[in-house]
Image: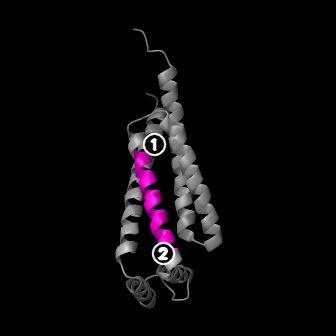
Amino acid sequence: MSRRAQRSGFLFRLAVVVKGADGVLQLLGALVLLLVPPALITGVANAVITRDLLGDQRGVLAHHLSRAAADLTEGGTRGFAVWYLLLHGVVKIGLVVTLSRRVVTAFPVACVVLLALVGYEVLRAVRTDSIGLAAFAAVDLLVVVAVWCEFRRLRREVSEPPAVG
């Protein structure tokens, strides 16, 4: 196996691990949002901001944390966040299981699903000025590249005749 193929394989495995961890964290986040009272969320955010744990209380990070906490305590936004995290987490874990088993036909499907999620994340990030969603979109886009490269490599392996000798 060439160095390039080894590097590509490593990046693919890393991307799968990152997406699996991301999916599990999103499921846990949905459960936390379901179980934690809204007042506790805003209380923790306020404690972080007032103790200058993010720097200036009027800084960018403090502003985004305060806004996110306020959004998550609203009924509609909170419900959206729970469903979004649940759906996103389940889809990612399903993709990770399928990709780990190297089901070649699943690779293009995974790319399309992840690109759809990237598109939605970008749209929602622009509408809400969310740094977090923009970061998720960037990571998902890198994963799409890694999955596509691994798909091309696997497809070449399948189509190449076995070496004689």
In this rendered view, identify the residue nearer to me: 3 or 95. Answer: 95
Q: Is residue 128 magenta?
A: no
Stretch in magenta: 77-96
Q: Does the magenta stretch include residue 95?
A: yes
Q: Please identify the dominant SS of the magenta region.
A: helix
Does the image show residue 145? no
Measured from the top left, where is residue 35 in percent x and y? 34, 75
Mark 1 vs 2, N-terminal side? 1
Measured from the top left, where is residue 42 in percent x and y? 43, 85
- At numbered mark 2, what does the secondary structure look like: helix, strand or loop? helix
- At numbered mark 1, what does the secondary structure look like: helix, strand or loop? helix
- Rendered residue at 45%/52% (across/down): 91
The residue identified by callout 2 is 78
Measured from the top left, where is residue 47 in percent x and y? 40, 88
Measured from the top left, where is residue 94 in percent x and y? 41, 48
* Left or right position of 82 against 135: left
- Rendered residue at 60%/59% (across/down): 120
In this rendered view, identify the residue nearer to me: 147 or 79. Answer: 79
